[in-house]
Amino acid sequence: MAKDDNSVRIFQGLLILGNVVIGMCGIALTAECIFFVSDPHGLYPLLEAAENDDIYAAAWIGIFVGFALLSLSVLGIIGVIKSNRTLLMVYIILMLITFAFEMASCITAATHRDFLTPNLFLKQMLERYEKQDTDNNNDKLMSEGVTKTWNNLMLQNHCCGVHGPSDWQQYGSAFRSTHSDADYPWPRQCCVLDARESPINLDGCKLGVPGYYNSNGCYDAISGPMNRQAWGVAWFGFAILCWTFLVLLGTMFYWSRIEY
Amino acid sequence: PQLAAPQLATSNPTLTTVALDKPFCMFDSSLSPNKSYSVYLYAMMESAVAGSSPVTDHGGKALNSTFQQTSGGRLSPYKAAVFSVPNCASPPDPADVGDVNKVADVLKQHLFRVGDDGTCLYDPNFLDVCNPPLAPDTTYRFKYTLVDNTDGIMKDQTLWSDPIKTRRVKLPMKIDTWPGRRSGGMIVITSILSVFLFLLLSGFLASVFSTVKGLEDSSVETRHVPQTVQHGEPRPQEGSE
């Protein structure tokens, strides 16, 4: 019996360790998802206008799942120490529900990352940047959001367009309908600006003289943060779920062996 | 006339403008030292070649046709610009482009942008040579002529340039935003997590069933015990009454 006792104690210890890890991962998941939801790069309006903002939905789910994991891990530790069948049954059922939610969050983040292609942002930029004749309030808000975001992007990252300034030349756009090509082959923000935010040489910028306009595209500045967010939520959640899977299997086995 | 050097003007031609190199050292053989000359730039659509493409009248005097008179170069060439003869002896150094103070000069002396002025067509007070934007997706040809300032007679001219076509616009609606294949990471996550959930649910059901079965087994054993206790209990009660 002593040997049995020992192995039971070891198993209990393992389960408690597993739950401690789950609790800490839950805190980390909450913190990471709060960081992503706070949108430090200001890219949310682009996704909102593209109606493809589900990686933010996945991050929101991640916040609440993190809290749930933390509280359930505490419940699990108490249940394992007391070897209480009811507590452990409640723990298992709630953990299964949390597992399902986190699984949804991971799959959503991974799937919707695939939709964020350069063409998506290109089409949205051409159709919404500086769009003046908006159909309704929603359209107006989204277009303003896109315009502000692109202006920030171009100014901070010294870039122009998605692939480059040639985007403005190759395609028609809402911008082109209000700004003539002779004066604005591309927006003023594509020019190299001085401290007072006016182009250092307007003719050089219009002609495309190297050094007076920004010749690289903004796609890297957009896709970098989005990738980090999507992969951060998806893969970290996946890792937590792998660990949770093992702990849950162990808990179910432990629960079925508890004598009344 | 040729398109401006690609190192200088990277986006050329655009939808409505064309940047041309100024005629360096092209007219020097015709220059007399004591006279002043100007260079006239004529532009016309390639479709106008079928008719006549005159840049002078019968007396050899340079024509002053405008953009409006020729319907934007559709009927015959129009005068797009007048500027002084470029200095062949000391051309501006293209390397000076990097210097912010000198770049305006270098650009002005080195090239000319046809279609630069978007407002002169609608400005009733504009008296200079109007250089309005060109039409998109149209082929144009250009010619430089050397004109004597005193009598307006054309002294020399270049050939008509090669056809230069302005850009064409693609509709943004036609951009295909379909992402294509799913990424490998997404497939891994989805499949593995689905398998995990299935295993967890089946494990949950298995443990519940095994517990229920264990309870049934133990309740079958304990059913015998209460029967013997029940027979035993009422007798002491009867005895006490």
Image (cartoon, coloured by chain):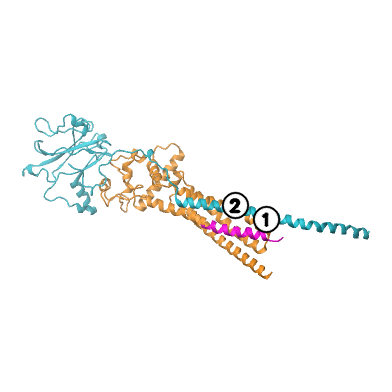
Eyeballing the image, is B32 above or below A257? above
> What is the secondary structure assignment of the residue under circle 2?
helix
Q: Nearer the viewer, mark 1 or mark 2?
A: 1
Question: What percent of the width, then of the height, locates residue B89?
Answer: 11, 50
In the depicted view, which residue is nearer to us: A73 or A169?
A73
Judging from the image, what is the letter of the chain drawn in cyan?
A: B
Contact between labelled residues 2 and 1, with CB atoms less than 8 Å apart? no
In the depicted view, which residue is nearer to us: A34 or B208?
B208
Question: What percent of the width, then of the height, locates residue B58?
Answer: 10, 30
Eyeballing the image, is B124 above or below B177? above
In the depicted view, which residue is nearer to us: B199 or B19?
B199
Cα distance, mark 1 to mark 2? 22 Å
The answer to whether one can see residue B129 in this image is no
Judging from the image, what is the letter of the chain drawn in orange?
A: A
Position of B241 with respect to B99 (left or right) is: right
The answer to whether one can see residue A74 in this image is yes
In the depicted view, which residue is nearer to us: B156 or B187?
B187
**Residue drawn at point x = 38 percent, y = 38 percent:** B173
- The picture quadrant where one finds residue B131 is top left
The residue that label 1 is drawn on is B210
Highlighted range, magenta: A239-260
- Type of the residue with mark 1: Ser
- Type of the residue with mark 2: Ile
| Residue A253 is a magenta residue | yes
Question: What percent of the width, then of the height, locates residue A160?
Answer: 34, 48
The residue that label 2 is drawn on is A97
Quadrant location, the C terminus of chain A? bottom right
